[in-house]
Image (tube, grey):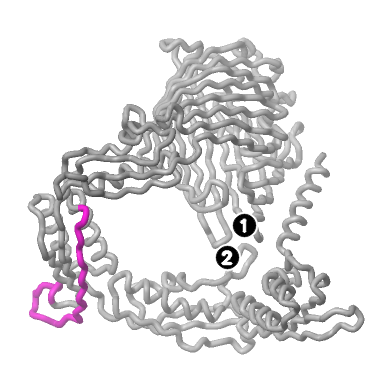
Amino acid sequence: MRRIWLGALLGLVLAASGCRSAGPAIAPEEAGYTLRFDGNRTFSNGTLRAHIAEGLDEFAASGLDRSFVDDAAFDLELYYQARGFPDAEVDYEVAPDADAGLLAVTFRVAEGPRTLVAGVTFDGATLFTGDELAGLLGGERAGLLSTGQLYYEEAAARAAQTSVEGLYVSRGYLDARVELLPPVFSEDRTRVELTYRVAEGPGYVLGAVAVTGAGIEDPAWDALVAELQGASGQPYLPRAPFGMKSRLVEALGAAGYPGAEVELTRTRSPGDDGEPGADPATTQARVDVELAVDPGPQVTLEGVRIEGLDDVKRGFVRDLLDLRVDRPVDTGAIREGLARLYATGLFKRVGHELVAVEGGPADHRELLVTVEEDAPLELFVEPGWGSYERARLRAGLRERNLFGRGLDLVAEGKVSTRDVRGRVQLTEPRFLGRDLEAGVSLLGSRREEPAFTSTEVGGGLFVRKRLDAHSTVTTGYQLRSTDATDVDPNANDPNLAAASDNVDLSSVSLDYRYDARQSLLRSAGGLYGFAGVEVGDEAIFSDLDFVRLRTQVAWFAQLADATILGLNLRSGVIWSGEDIPVQEQFFNGGQNSVRSFQRSELAVDANGDIVGGEAASTFTLELRQRLFGDLEGAAFVDVGNVSVDASKPFDDTYTGVAYGVGLRYLLPIGALRIDVGFNPDPGPFDEDFVVHFAVGNPF
């Protein structure tokens, strides 16, 4: 079996390697020519062929027009130069091949030395450190993980001039100038020193802020104007005047002036020495700002008209818009209402316009909202694979507009060689007309675990509040009937055998989730956190009094363009004054925990029987490196435990470690993953290594 898995791993490597060497769509021999590369030592024929594949296809489609070969040679030169070969030259020859009866195309590569940037100096820079400015110099890096020294690329070195100047300007140094001096190469041209001459110039401050034109009679407006004028004398940031303009327009829009215009004028002054103690806003280099306000007429919102509805109820849309009529138009409230419409996912398009009211007063408007509905019914089928479950299939339907009120109904089922489960959930996205999500669910499952078979039937209620773009808090109630059968009598302490009977659990829960990951499918930077507590008590008709705590923190750092370091800590503990049913205990080991063990097999006793516990934890450190295309490599360390005593959650009686490597091929449904976890200290019942094949990253 291990040979089969390792063969699959090797096959994935070879398949991915083949993807890297993809060439022109039209094979050279079919187009009437042969292709050859001479002199290339660093990059393979396949890599170079893939880089100019598009040009070769154009060459074939043109009837072998040699100008496309000339373009391809130039592209190859740029390819080399962008990867640290400043002296690279690529010539070519197109000649008849008498033996093959075809046209022979030969690219002759003179690579020259590969040059590393040995040092970068910024003469005259005082506001920023040399390391801060050197970080703006882009390009490829040496080293296995592309984290070594920077390769020299002339275009990138020159582009850094503009980047450094832009950084200075963003801090108010509007006259800053940066010049790249001639690079200094080593004698063998394998190293280069770069020097930039920096003339920082003066740091500008925000001068006088004048709000002119016709204002409005409103205390909030007066306070805003005073706040903007009070910013005079602060360091000048180029984006600040635009922020001032936007705030004025928003304030006018909220007060009923939807057509308000603000004209921005900036005047730069070099400044002078002035008198001792003089206001720096009038003596330093400064930028004076004038904001000329034309509020236009104040407009009253007389009504809301909605067009384009088919299945969505008009009252539901009005509730989402939540706009007050017979009052001055509030453009901010309109914008927020339209955002709520978009967020439902029920519409392909949402447009709006303030239109005149027929026969009404000149200063009254009606809000015309035009929508185009999207199909609310979604059917899905998702195949998958897990190292324990083997083949699995998830399928179901989702109706996002039940009863025309935006109610979300999901009915789904999952089947694999080890489990069967189903779930039906109805969700109200705006519970009680507020930004609350509430729902009710029913579920059932039967799953074969390594030490027992678990059956569960139940349901629950929940209310969820989104706190911000990344955070949610959820509270709920669950009622579950659980049962464990086929329990190995030696799988746990014999005293717990009675606790494996059918148990009805009634509990309340509170969860907090923070998700700032940049991507859920691909390796990227970000942070994920979860903390949840569940409490069961006989007062709410639970057979078991318990408190269960679960936590997870996953942190991802982008070390380089193609390199991600991931850290994951997952733990759980359950406290109870009674015997805990085996189906409610914690186990460890498997494709998403300690990968040198099969599922749930980290903790075994002296007889080789699986042990569950009242607590378990897993810590993982994983380095992910994009190799090429959609193929990633990974190296990882997993450390985990199972504790039979909740008062000692990190007890090391049952502890396991995995050192491993893996490959992931990124697909739209997640990563197709093969991981090999090696056990550095296997026990008498442990395997030396375990191979996991799964869909999706481990965290």
**Disc 2 to disc 1: CB gap under 8 Å:** no
Q: Quadrant of the C terminus?
A: top right
x and y percentages locating residue 653 in the rendered image: 62, 30
Mark 1 element type: strand
**For residue 513, above or below residue 647:** below
Q: Is residue 357 visible?
A: yes
Whole-percent x, y for residue 384 in the image = 67, 38
- Element at label 2: loop
Identity, as a three-letter code, of the amino acid under mark 2: Thr
Magenta span of residues? 258-282
Label 1 crowd (10 A; few <14 / some 14-19 / many >=20)? many
Relative to 276, 655 lies left or right: right
To which residue does mark 2 refer?
147
Name the disc covering residue 152, or none: none
Magenta stretch encompasses residue 72: no
Could you say which is closer to the camera, residue 286 or residue 410? 410
Q: The residue under label 1 is which amino acid type?
A: Gln
Residue carrying label 1: 625
Residue at image coords 26%, 64%? 242
Q: Is residue 352 left or right of residue 68?
A: left
Vertical side of 206 occupied by 250: above or below: above
Residue sitting at x 59%, y 20%: 444
In the image, 212 versus 186, the foreground residue is: 212
Q: Position of residue 332 (x, y in %)?
A: 25, 48
Determine crowd level at label 2: few under 14, some 14-19, many 20+ residues with C-alpha closer than 10 A.
Answer: some
In the displayed structure, would residue 365 be above or below residue 407? below
Residue 281: in magenta span: yes
User: On the image, which quarter does residue 233 sit in?
Assistant: bottom left
Pinpoint residue 665: horizontal percent, then vertical percent. 67, 51
